[in-house]
Image (cartoon, rainbow, N blue to C red):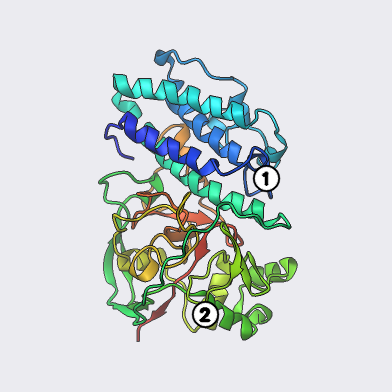
Amino acid sequence: MSTDPISADRYCEVRSWTEQLAAPLSPEDQTVQSMPDTSPTKWHRAHTSWFFETFVLATPELGYEPFDPRFAYLFNSYYEAVGDRYPRPQRGVISRPGVAEVGAYRRHVDGAMVELLGTGLDPSLHSLVDLGLHHEQQHQELVLMDIKHVLSLNPRLPPYLDAPPRPEPRAEDRVWRSHDGGLVEVGHDGRGFAFDNESPRHQRVLRPFEIAPGLVTCGDWQDFIADGGYQRPELWMSDGWATVRAESWAAPLYWAGGAVFTLHGRRPIDRSEPVCHVSWYEADAYARWAGARLPDEAEWEVSAPAPPESDRSGAPGAYCHPGSRGGAGGWYSQVWQWTASPYGAYPGYRPSPGAVGEYNGKFMVNQYALRGSSCATPAGHARRTYRNFFPPSARWPFTGLRLVRDQA
């Protein structure tokens, strides 16, 4: 984590973006939890405030008075070291505190944080504030992921926002790119912010491979469906095939009747857009059908360019659906890309000290790593070394894929 000083302006910029994301939603919208993996919008707003209150403002010498001591139980997510927490699957039954009180809680925390940042932080707190801001950016993407799932279950299929004009599609390079393999270095180099799971930088040996210059598209996926992709057990991992049958999967999440539900409402499937909302099981099966495979993390990292400085969020007023944004190849700002790598520790990994050490390390089991960023990822949050992760059955994140194949 970075130890560079954080300005009050930077803090307010990140925090205000969360409020802009929530602004189009009614109090009723913000209270619904559509499945155990999602959380209500107001919970995200409160939890990110709880993080600053718990890990920064609660430092004894600051003399901070909590907004409501009961919030410590309600809005703890999974930090065992700081106390008990309310069960995650039941967050949607908490009608109080309401949206207005959560807003007051955010203003209370923000007032104390801005005052603290204005008077100068103890150097030991710099990294915690920086971590808190990047943590909030993760929850900003979760706000969009979760509310999309909520709205998709409404028979009226209401949009989160009316759709702005769709961007013009860009011509994509279709030539696969070769990499000689050999000894490579991957992982964060220590300059600037990174989560602890991105370190330490280490060496890997790769065999020669070719990587697709673009993402798998909706048209590609329609061809997979037409060829019986969801009816052919030989394409699937055993657990994936069992999931397909148990859940009656026949297409990506949000596809139905030749149309797709988006945050801007329902519209026809565009064959040129990157396919989105597919699980690792589906991505792996598609790659096998296509005569290719998913890249491992190192192959993706040594092939990807640095994120463009113009990388922007798909939040209010923007086109928050995979399309032509994100630069050539769609490495960033379209869909998170599944890899073949189980999410685990790099050689020599050590979790951050203290309670924040629970942030990443304890999830290094039964998950797969994703790389890149999505149309819902906030500005400046993408890195080449960023390691996202989800269980292999997860479909509600903005997840897609690109392919690799071994080079003869």
Using the image, determine if residue 270 lies above or below residue 123: below
Q: How many marks?
A: 2
Say which mark, if any, is on residue 157.
none
List x then y, in percent, for residue 169.
41, 72
List x then y, in percent, for residue 14.
40, 38
Nearer to me, 6 or 9: 9
Label 1 element class = loop
Q: Quadrant of residue 318?
A: bottom left
Label 2 element class = helix
Disc 1 to disc 2, how far (Cα)? Answer: 33 Å
Q: Residue at x 56, y 44 (%)?
A: 24
Nearer to me, 173 or 406: 173
Say which mark, if any, is on residue 220.
2
List x then y, in percent, for residue 61.
40, 14
Q: Residue at x 69, y 40 (%)?
A: 92
Q: Is residue 3 visible?
A: yes
Identified by mark 2, the residue type is Asp
Other-residue count near label 2 (Cα within 10 Å), few / some / many at <14 / 14–19 / ≥20: some
Relative to 326, 396 lies left or right: right
